[in-house]
Image: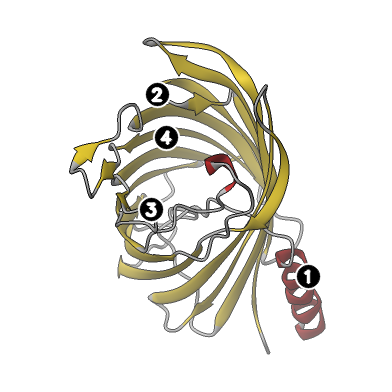
C-alpha cells in the first residue's frame, strides 16, 4: 500500500508541472481526513465561452475564447479536525478575434487553504467545517491582452463554510458558502468581492458508485479604479449553474469524478454553455 501511495503522489506531482486552475475552495464535504493523511488531486476541464452579455441580453460571443487545462491540489491532515492544502494552477488559453490571436499558457495565482472541522461529520451525524483561503498573486502575464493574465494580480482572502448532513437512506445533502475579500492589483484596480453558494445532493447507488446534482450561485461585485475612485462599468457579474456528475471508487482511497456544469442564467461579461470536467482524488497515509 505504501508503494502505491508513493506512485500516486509522484504521478500527481508530475501532472502539476502542467496544471491550471480556478481552484475550488468548496471542494469536498464537511468530512476531514484522519491525522497524518495526505490528499492529492488532478483535474481536467474545458470551457468554450460562446456567449457574451451585450445590451442587456446574451448574444453570440464575437471573439472565440477558449479556456482549458488542469488543476491540482495537495493536502495534509495536521489533526483529525484540521487540514492544510495548496492549490497550484496552470491555464491554457486561446482567443481569436479581428484584433487578437493568442495561444497562451502560464501559472495562475496559488491558493493556500485550511479546513477546520467545527462539528465532525460521520455517516450518522451532520458536520460543519470552516474554510479559510489565502490567494497569492503568482499569476504571470503571458500576453499583451488582459485575457492572457493567469490571475488578477491581487492578494486576496476568503472565508467559507461547508455543512453536510448525515446519510439519510442513500441520500446526503450539502450547503456550502464562500466569500472572497479581494484587494488591489498591480494596475491599482480594487478587485470586487466574490460570493459563491452551493446546494448539493448526493445519492449512493452502490458501495463504489455515487451520483450528485448541484446548484451553484456566483456573484462578483464591480471593480473600482482606485486613483479615480470610480467603479468600472459592466465588470460585476452573476451566474447560476446546474452540475450533474458521479463518483466512482475502484479501490480504497481513490475517487474518479466526471461531471458537467451547465450555465442556466446570469448577467454581464462572457459565459460558456457547458463545462465538462473529470478529476481524480487519492487519499492515503505514508505507512
Q: Position of residue 281 (x, y in %)?
A: 65, 60
Residue where numbered disc 4 is placed: 216
Of marks 4 and 1, the one in the foreground? 1
Q: Residues within 10 Å of mark 1 (few under 14, many from 20)?
A: few
**Quarter of the view holding residue 120:** bottom left
Q: Are marks 2 and 3 in contact (CB under 8 Å)?
A: no
| Left or right for 215, reference 181 | right
Q: Is residue 256 visible?
A: no
| Left or right for 147, reference 125 | right
Mark 3 or 1, nearer chain start: 1
**Quarter of the view holding residue 3:** bottom right
Question: Helix, strand, or loop for circle 3?
Answer: loop
How much space separates mark 3 and mark 4, taking CA atoms?
30 Å
**Quarter of the view holding residue 119:** bottom left
Residue where numbered disc 1 is placed: 14
Q: Residues within 10 Å of mark 4 (few under 14, many from 20)?
A: some
Residue where numbered disc 2 is placed: 268
Q: Are marks 4 and 1 in contact (CB under 8 Å)?
A: no
Q: Residues within 10 Å of mark 3 (few under 14, many from 20)?
A: few
How much space separates mark 4 and mark 1, taking CA atoms?
31 Å
Question: Which residue occupies the foreground of this view, 208 or 88?
Answer: 88
Question: Helix, strand, or loop for circle 4?
Answer: strand
Q: Is residue 142 visible?
A: yes
| Left or right for 226, reference 101 | left
Q: Position of residue 116 (x, y in %)?
A: 34, 71
Q: Residue furthest left?
A: 229
How much space separates mark 3 and mark 1, taking CA atoms?
34 Å
For residue 187, the mark is: 3
| Left or right for 151, reference 121 | right
Amino acid at each position: 500500500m505504501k508503494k502505491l501511495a508513493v506512485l500516486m503522489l509522484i504521478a500527481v506531482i508530475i501532472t502539476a508541472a502542467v496544471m491550471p486552475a480556478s481552484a475550488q475552495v468548496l471542494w469536498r464535504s464537511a468530512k476531514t481526513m484522519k491525522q497524518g493523511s495526505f490528499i492529492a488531486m488532478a483535474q481536467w476541464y474545458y470551457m468554450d465561452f460562446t456567449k457574451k452579455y451585450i445590451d442587456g441580453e446574451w448574444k453570440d460571443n464575437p471573439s472565440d475564447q477558449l479556456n482549458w487545462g488542469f488543476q491540482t491540489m495537495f493536502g495534509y491532515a495536521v489533526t483529525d479536525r484540521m487540514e492544510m492544502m495548496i492549490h497550484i494552477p496552470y491555464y491554457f488559453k486561446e482567443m481569436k478575434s479581428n484584433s487578437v490571436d493568442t495561444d497562451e499558457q502560464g501559472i495562475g495565482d496559488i491558493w493556500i487553504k485550511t479546513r477546520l472541522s467545527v462539528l465532525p461529520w460521520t455517516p450518522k451525524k451532520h458536520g460543519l467545517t470552516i474554510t479559510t483561503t489565502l490567494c497569492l498573486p503568482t499569476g504571470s502575464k503571458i500576453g499583451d491582452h488582459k485575457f492572457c493574465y493567469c490571475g488578477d494580480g491581487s492578494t486576496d482572502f476568503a472565508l467559507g463554510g461547508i455543512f453536510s448532513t448525515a446519510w439519510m437512506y442513500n441520500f446526503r445533502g450539502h450547503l456550502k458558502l464562500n466569500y472572497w475579500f479581494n484587494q488591489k492589483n498591480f494596475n491599482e484596480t480594487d478587485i470586487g468581492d466574490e460570493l459563491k453558494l452551493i446546494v448539493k445532493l448526493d445519492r449512493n447507488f452502490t458501495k463504489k458508485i455515487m451520483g450528485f446534482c448541484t446548484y451553484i450561485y456566483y456573484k462578483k461585485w464591480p471593480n473600482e479604479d482606485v486613483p479615480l475612485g470610480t467603479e468600472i462599468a459592466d465588470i460585476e457579474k452573476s451566474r447560476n449553474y446546474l452540475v450533474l456528475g458521479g463518483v466512482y471508487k475502484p479501490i480504497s482511497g481513490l475517487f474518479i469524478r466526471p461531471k458537467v456544469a451547465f450555465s442556466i442564467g446570469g448577467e454581464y461579461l462572457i459565459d460558456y454553455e457547458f463545462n465538462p470536467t473529470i478529476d481524480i482524488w487519492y487519499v492515503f497515509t505514508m505507512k
